[in-house]
Image: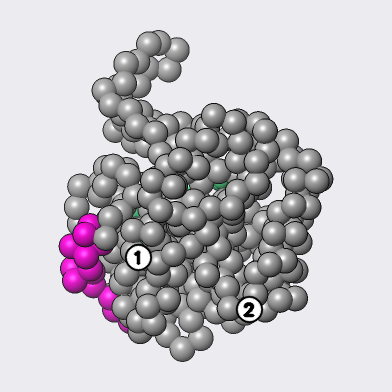
């Protein structure tokens, strides 16, 4: 079973506006609510690709109830821990550009933390664990490390989609998959990256450091994939971008789903990119049909163009 862990889920409240006026009244032309948070998005996309998963994490209050209900409607299994505090609402403002305001997250007491760690004791080496998203500020900074220790002790392949010091720290645990975007890769190495070739070089460094699969997402510029035997480049397909929130998560889901279906590495990479772009071209996360419609148009090549 694939387990996705979202320590800090959210409702993503998307507001489409024409001409946002800071300090004034702006009326939205369209709004929508989605269950969000990186691991939850991955579980939702996995389910759309017919791959079961169980979503783990902390939720609570009326917003948590909405997430639970939405996941049940989509037949996504969950085993969340109830916090008794409302799950955050993250605002995604769509104007000519996209702006995001993400909430901080709840107070997670030590008993709640321990319940989660105990839950992870039930996983085995036949499972996969994805840890994704930010750590609520009430948790100790090394909380992901505790989880990584557990997965190391139990030989559970660990996929990681986070940023900053948490990502840096987790590299020591030789993740099975990591998916930094360009900004996260630059932050990781403390550099500015100017070309795809340079990006590929840093992805290869991560492989040399012990990451089994490295996906670097480059937004509308596509993506790069590296493992110990190959480095591949993909251009993103063209289309009308509607909402890129969750595009990175969709890419991770595409990778995990295609791996589960035992596709070859090029097909796995193509599926990952198709999922990311199909989400960018949709209001919500990608659908299976959306992914299929892009699949053949994605160009994969080795080395720089
Ligand atoms: N503007 C876009 N056009 C086409 N595909 C896109 C666009 N933005 C994102 N994607 C797709 O989604 C993937 C992940 O997007 P990205 O924005 O890099 O992730 P993140 O949300 O983690 O920063 C990209 O590699 C690409 O396949
Ligand atoms: O945990 P964080 O870093 O605050 O991110 C949470 C946000 O990221 C998302 O999971 C989207 O992530 P991506 O756009 O990177 O795929 C939203 O659903 C959510 O609002």
Label 2, secondary structure: give it.
Answer: loop
Taking depth in this image into account, of 2 and 31 the one nearest to the observer is 2
Q: Position of residue 206 (x, y in %)?
A: 57, 74
Residue named by callout 2: 125
| In the rendered image, the vertical position of residue 202 relative to residue 185, given as above or below | below
Instruction: Kindly give the residue lying farthest to the top in the view shown.
Output: 24
On the question of residue 17 being in view, the answer is yes
Residue 44 on image: x %, y %: 41, 54
State whether residue 105 is above or below residue 288: above
Secondary structure of residue under mark 1: loop
Mark 2: few/some/many CA within 10 Å (<14, 14-19, 20+): few
Q: Which residue sits at x=21%, y=59%?
A: 289
Task: Please report the residue visible at 45 percent of the width from the left and 40 percent of the height from the top.
Answer: 69
Q: Would you identify the image quadrant in which residue 157 lies? A: bottom right
> Is label 1 within 8 A of ligand 1 (CB to nearest ligand atom)?
no
Disc ID at residue 50: 1
- Please give left or right for residue 203 compared with residue 232 in the image: right
Q: Residue at x 33, y 64 (%)?
A: 49
The colour scheme is one colour
- Sequence-first disc among 2 and 1: 1
* Residue 278: in magenta span: no
Measured as percent of width and height from the top left, residue 148 is found at: 70, 66
The answer to whether residue 203 is seen in the rendering is no
Q: Nearer the viewer, residue 92 or 81?
A: 81
Q: Which segment did they paint magenta?
A: 289-302
């Amino acid at each position: 079973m694939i387990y996705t862990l979202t320590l800090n889920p959210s409702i993503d409240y998307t507001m489409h506006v024409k001409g946002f006026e800071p300090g004034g009244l702006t009326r939205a032309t369209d709004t929508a609510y989605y269950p969000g948070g990186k691991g939850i998005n991955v579980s939702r996309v996995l389910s759309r690709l017919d791959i079961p998963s169980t979503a783990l994490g902390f939720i609570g209050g009326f917003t948590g109830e909405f997430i639970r209900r939405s996941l049940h409607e989509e037949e996504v299994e969950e085993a969340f821990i109830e916090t008794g505090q409302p799950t955050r609402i993250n605002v995604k403002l769509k104007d000519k550009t996209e702006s995001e305001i993400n909430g901080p997250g709840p107070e997670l007491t030590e008993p709640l933390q321990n319940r989660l760690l105990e839950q992870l004791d039930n996983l085995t080496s036949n499972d996969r664990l994805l840890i994704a998203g930010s750590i609520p500020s009430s948790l100790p900074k090394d909380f992901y490390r505790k989880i990584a220790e557990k997965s190391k002790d139990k030989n559970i392949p660990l996929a990681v989609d986070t940023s900053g010091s948490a990502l840096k720290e987790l590299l020591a645990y030789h993740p099975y998959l990591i998916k930094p975007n360009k900004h996260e890769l630059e932050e990781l190495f403390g550099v500015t990256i100017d070309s795809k070739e340079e990006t590929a070089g840093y992805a290869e460094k991560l492989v040399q450091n012990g990451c089994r699969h490295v996906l670097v997402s480059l937004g509308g510029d596509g993506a790069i994939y590296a493992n110990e035997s190959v480095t591949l480049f993909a251009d993103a397909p063209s289309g009308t971008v509607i909402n890129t929130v969750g595009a990175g998560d969709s890419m991770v889901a595409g990778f995990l789903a295609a791996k589960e279906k035992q596709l070859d590495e090029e097909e796995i990479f193509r599926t990952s990119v198709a999922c990311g772009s199909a989400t960018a071209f949709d209001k919500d996360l990608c659908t299976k049909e959306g992914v299929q419609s892009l699949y053949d148009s994605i160009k994969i090549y080795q080395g720089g163009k």
